[in-house]
Amino acid sequence: MSDPDNSTTYITMNRKINTNTYYYNTTFSTYGNFSFYIWANDTNNNQVYSNISGFVIPPNWDINNDRICSMEDLLLVSDQYGKNGSPGWIREDIDNNGTIQVFDFVLLSNHYTSSW
């Protein structure tokens, strides 16, 4: 897997018990563009590679995922102000504590006009 900082990580996948299905489950702590491919190597040293695929993880402060922190992001948070749910229940819960509150605005304002 290639991280947004262009570093590469090799990850061993897990096999689902009694199946031929493999998976990898993780939580990402950084935002940006990621790419990955799957490489399989069997016991006879036969190898096969998939095509490279990608995915994007937006930062918490980019509520509408348009790659810039703008007035629209502030308005989206204000529409949810005072509401509660499980931590990180909606994107407007920027600090992932379950409550849309003033601190969410503070975190967002720290990135106002920032792009990624």
Image (cartoon, rainbow, N blue to C red):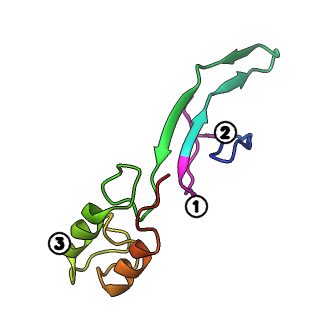
Disc 2 crowd rating (10 Å Cα; few below 14, some 14-19, many 20+) is some
The answer to whether 16 is drawn above or below residue 112 in the figure is above
Disc 3 crowd rating (10 Å Cα; few below 14, some 14-19, many 20+) is few
Question: Which residue corresponds to mark 2?
Answer: 2
Quadrant the N terminus occupies: top right
87 or 30: nearer the eye?
Answer: 30
Question: Which residue corresponds to mark 3?
Answer: 79
Disc 1 crowd rating (10 Å Cα; few below 14, some 14-19, many 20+) is few
| Residue 17 visible, this angle | no
19 or 44: nearer the eye?
Answer: 44
Depth check, mark 1 against mark 3: the one in front is 3
The amino acid pointed to by label 1 is Ser
53 in magenta: no
Question: Which residue corresponds to mark 1?
Answer: 29
Does label 2 or label 3 sit earlier along the sequence? Answer: 2
Q: Secondary structure at mark 3?
A: helix
Kindly identify the residue that appears in the image at 29 percent across and 79 percent down: 100
Percent from the top left, x then y, of residue 53? 54, 28
Quadrant position of residue 99: bottom left
Cα gap from disc 1 to disc 2, whole angstroms: 14 Å
